[in-house]
Image: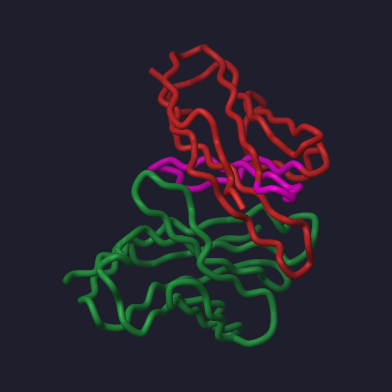
Amino acid sequence: AQSVAQPEDQVNVAEGNPLTVKCTYSVSGNPYLFWYVQYPNRGLQFLLKYITGDNLVKGSYGFEAEFNKSQTSFHLKKPSALVSDSALYFCAVSPLMDTGRRALTFGSGTRLQVQP
Amino acid sequence: KAGVTQTPRYLIKTRGQQVTLSCSPISGHRSVSWYQQTPGQGLQFLFEYFSETQRNKGNFPGRFSGRQFSNSRSEMNVSTLELGDSALYLCASSLINEFTDTQYFGPGTRLTVL
């Protein structure tokens, strides 16, 4: 069975400072990893994904994530936070094998609050 | 391209009733997945449809069912509604491809069961 842990319910950061939202995962075989963001009363918006290749993945709106296989982590980062980045962030994992690839397992979510 | 659309956006039902939710995927996307989001359980995978066939199913009771039509539009049905079925139901579509298999989500249908 696969699982995702987002250890922080909330992350607070000042505008202009770097931000990190943490995610660790457990999956059999190679993982397929995603970050999504959810704004109030909205669905999930895709930010970035890791399938294979470079461990540093660049995504939308200046976000990036670093895949670390030995630590089974996929932390989301941004060099300079904006107030508009305040939202709920979800990490998700699925096995790379085709039959289960679109059955995503999500973490519990981390609320990011960026203070002006 | 238009995104994933879900109708209706809001629904209020009473216990014991049944409900049908609709999802139209992004044009060209042939896979549709459904997820339930609640404050207590978070985001949970319900099922996935591709080419009108259910390919994956999450751990939900048989009251939850779905189908997909030849134009890739999908519906999910919940029968004999319970209070615990109150949730945001999200639909996601994807283009089946080894390297671009990303799910794009709709805005969701907020179901309230009274």
Q: Is residue B34 left or right of residue B13?
A: right
Specify the chain shown as red: B
Q: Is residue A114 left or right of residue B64?
A: left
Whether B34 is among the magenta residues is yes
In the rendered image, the residue lying farthest to the left is: A116
Q: Quadrant of the C terminus of chain A?
A: bottom left
Q: Is residue A20 left or right of residue B91?
A: left
Q: Residue at x 47, y 42 (%)?
A: B37
Q: B70 or B46, which lies in front?
A: B70
Q: Colour of chain A?
A: green
Q: Position of residue A62 (x, y in %)?
A: 43, 78
In the rendered image, the residue lying farthest to the front is: B1
Q: Position of residue A33 (x, y in %)?
A: 60, 69
Res B57 quadrant in image: top right
Q: Which residues are magenta?
A: B26-49
Q: Residue at x 80, y 60 (%)?
A: A98
